[in-house]
Amino acid sequence: MRKIFKTSMAVALSVCMAAALTACGGSGSSASSEPAAEATEAADAAEETADTGAKIKIGGSGPLTGPAAVYGQAVKNAAEIAVEEVNAKGGLQFELDMEDDAHDPEKAVTAYGVLKDWGMQVSLATVTSAPGAAVSPSYAEDQIFAITPSGSSPAVVFADPDNLSGAYGNVFQMCFTDPNQGSASADYISAHTDLGSKVAIIYKNDDNYSKGIHDTFVAEAAVKNVEVVYEGTFDDSNAQDFSVQLGQAQDAGADIVFLPIYYDPASLILTQANQMGYKPTFFGVDGMDGILTLEGFDTSLAEGVYLLTPFSADAEDELTVNFVNAYKEKCGGEIPNQFAADAYDCVYAIAQACEAAGVTADMSSDEICAKLVEQFTSMTFSGLTGESMTWNENGEVTKSPKAVVIQNGVYVGVED
Amino acid sequence: MKEKTALFSLFGDKKKRGRFVSFAIVIAAYIIIEILLKSGSLSSLFKSLLVPITCYVVASIGLNLNVGISGELNLGQAGFMSVGAFCAICVSGILAGTVTAGIPRLIIAIICGAVLAGIFGFVIGIPVLKLQGDYLAIVTLAFGQIIKSIFMNTYIGFDSDGLHFSFVDSKFKLQPGGKMLLNGPMGATGTQKIANFTVGIILVLIALLIVYNLMFSRSGRAIMAARDNRIAAESVGIPISRTKMLAFVVSASLAGAAGGLYGLNYATLVPNKFDFNTSILILVYVVLGGLGNMTGTIISTVVLILLPELLRSLQDYRMLIYAVVLILIMLVTNNDWLKTKWKSLTSRKAKGGASNG
């Protein structure tokens, strides 16, 4: 008995330590944004004295702590920048509250409760897909307009994702969906035979993002006669060593390795392939975005990596340059990734729709919802992540992914 | 040993009082919350937490039966929850066309989840509970991981032709209008949310009823005897593995029922949710609540679920504070000086009460 008690105590203690560590990790990355947050508060205070008009409350949740915190933090920072900019213009005034959901559907539902108590009128939904699928029914039930920056799964907008039917109608997506990315990647590879002809895929089979893209890629590859010679999988528990998968891909003679995964494991794959002397063309999707800012990663290894992303931080148009500078200033020189760009666009799209529909802060959330749904299904929006985007009545966005290649440590757009 | 028997004689009557307190707390909490719900003064945050709290309470009551009363460490309670959850989701999905009313379907689904989890517990228990030592901890730890992997690779679909099932990859095509009940790593999506708080509270009461009745029954005494001294218990003819099996299967079924309720409370559920961390979390609720102490378990579960939500105002520091609070609770509840103080305080009270009565 006593022994068991001791064992459980030890286990419980170690859990506490782990929790404390992850919490440190989470707060570490946000420490840089604190001065900026203070600045926002100061700016808010200044505005309140100048302009006494009420503000439209924008809520949202994302992983601000835990392993996916990079995405949540990026969305939070970028949304804050966009809200500041919109407020600074005068006229429409926004107030933002991003809650933490730690990439957990259960916590996302609780975070939704927090936001509702706060009086959220418009929402950025969630940053990641699984939590998004959990809260979308609540948004539909309460008729609060939501647009997710990066919840790319069809389950975020459809109640019945298997048949792509039963759309919630008031939940929209700013990013392109997983199926879209998979088929676009296959199309791109089939159209560019100079990259290679034999494709190996290494994907994470316990992650619905990775699995979703893999499935549609394979389906489209069969149609487009792209030869898939090897499929390797990994999951959370063995995401450290990829030598087996890479070795098998090499033996199968693959000259393209398709990586529909997030950049963290991708960086290990690149490093280990380099150690093995295996040099295929690596092809990633939007999850690969962020690899150049990963700490401790030799970015020269990412040279020549292709990826599909709607946003490249080195684009020279005015909008991108301004955003990148504002983001760098706010986050201590960090370069914004695609998640940040999507969030920035979300806030501006909401602003554009609110202005067009004449939404004011004293309207109720379902009034705003009806007006915004009408606007979003009819308007076109141009932002960081695409020109003249439109939305269908299901809430899916129409825009085309852009292929970029990493050269000299920056993204360079590839002309089709 | 001596200490233990002394404790038992001291708390002989108290245990029954403990039972009364447990039920009183749960029923009082239910009445207060229902009043708040009806008057509309409960915030959305708390509303969203009601059902998950009852789920975790049921799972931790079950785990406490196994860890506290039976003395076998179980590190895979979340695995049993996931069995119950996915079973309940599948049953609810299949019955959606025939049993349209939510509550009967919910009850059927929860019962199926509990039974299936109990069967899993029984199968695991057969070899392991015959052994002496911490083997159950090792095996349940492995079970939690294995069951997660299995659900990640299970595809179950339901359409007008009936049930489709496949491992590793979805090899079947569904008829139009068909529904994937379980879609590998994507888990269950688009589940109808039919769980509600009242059913949750009833489940908590049933769990308490089962556990207390078991504790004070002949079998319950046998379970505790087997925990305290295996050899002595064997010598008086108690079948050790059978009594331990009883506690383990009941514990697993309660986790399955909790999982069933949990699964039907969310539109989406991924197998990753029920990982090792969730098992440990439930174990933390049990350990902090006190091994063998059901009232304590209920209170610690509720407090530890509410704590991170109430700390939201601390923003980035909340998980840090949460961890610190956990450590503090452990230090305080384990402090010998405080314990003796508390004991002398309560025993004086008990004596006073006795002389008065």
Image: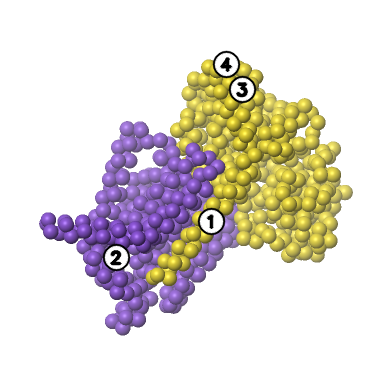
Chain colours: A yellow, B purple
Mark 2 lies on residue: B214
* Nearer-the-camera pick, A33 or B206: A33
Label 4 with label 2: CB-CB less than 8 Å = no
Determine the CA span between mark 2 and mark 3: 63 Å
Check disc 1: other Cα within 10 Å, few if <14, some if 14-19, many if 20+.
some
Q: CA distance from mark 4 to mark 1?
A: 47 Å
**Disc 2 to disc 3: CB gap under 8 Å:** no
**In terms of secondary structure, where does tag 1 sit?**
helix
> x, y (%) of residue A216?
69, 48
Q: At which x and y percent is residue A68?
A: 62, 47
The amino acid beneath tag 1 is Met
Label 3: element kind: helix
Q: Residues within 10 Å of mark 4 (few under 14, many from 20)?
A: few
The local secondary structure at tag 2 comes to helix
Q: Are marks 3 and 4 on the same chain?
A: yes
Q: Tell me the CA gap for discs 3 and 1.
A: 41 Å
Q: Residue at x 30, y 37 (%)?
A: B35
Q: Which amino acid, mark 3?
A: Asn
Mark 3 nearby-residue class (10 Å; few <14, some 14–19, many ≥20): some
From the image, state whether disc 4 or disc 2 is nearer to you.
4
Badge 2 sits on which subunit? Answer: B
Q: Which residue is mark 3?
A: A87
- The residue that mark 4 highlights is A50
Residue A367, percent from left and from top: 50, 23
Question: Counting residues from the N terminus, which is met first, the one under dot 3 or under dot 1?
Answer: 1
Give how far apart the Cα atoms at labels 3 and 4 are. Answer: 12 Å
Which residue is disc 1 drawn over? Answer: A17
Indicate the position of residue B91 as horizontal and vertical percent values: 45, 54
Query: Is label 4 in a helix, a strand or a loop?
Result: helix
Q: Tell me the tag on residue A151.
A: none
Report the chain holding disc 1.
Answer: A
Q: Amino acid at mark 4?
A: Ala
